[in-house]
Image: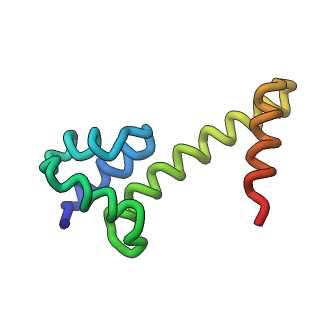
Amino acid sequence: MNLTEEQLSALEELAGLFFSPAEIMLNLEIPLHLEDEFRNIILLKNEDPIFIAYNKGRIAAEIELRQAIKQAALNGSNPAQTSMLNFYLNSKI
């Protein structure tokens, strides 16, 4: 599956807004009968430009969210402090 640079950029943005793979495909006008192939690429093919764009967008958005949660935790928000603790516990190798 080949996407243009414009589609890859849109894919990164949509993934960063946490749209589902099917919603992204609809927006990019990728036929839905290719959904299994698309999902396999974004889950498994770590050198494919689609994998990179999808995961780059998703992770960039998660970074922003975690930074906001961290700031809220530092400002005394108990739910944010719990979230940060959970991030910490889940990040151990």
**Residue 67 drawn at (x, y percent):** 69, 41
- Give the side of residue 25 with respect to residue 78, left or right: left
> Which residue is nearer to you in this view: 1 or 73?
1
- Determine the image quadrant of residue 48: bottom left
> Which residue is nearer to you in this view: 82 or 3?
82
Query: 45 above or below 43?
Result: below
Residue at the spot 53% in from the left edge and 52% down from the top edge: 59
Residue at the outermost bottom position: 47
Residue at the spot 52% in from the left edge and 44% down from the top edge: 61
Image quadrant holding the C terminus, namely bottom right
Number of disc labels: 0
Query: 12 above or below 84?
Result: below
Colour scheme in the image?
A: rainbow
- Give the side of residue 20 with respect to residue 79, left or right: left
**Residue 10 drawn at (x, y percent):** 29, 48
**Residue 17 drawn at (x, y percent):** 43, 38
Image quadrant holding the N terminus, namely bottom left
Residue at the spot 60% in from the left edge and 42% down from the top edge: 64
- Give the side of residue 4 with respect to residue 91, left or right: left
Residue at the spot 27% in from the left edge and 43% down from the top edge: 22
**Residue 72 drawn at (x, y percent):** 77, 29
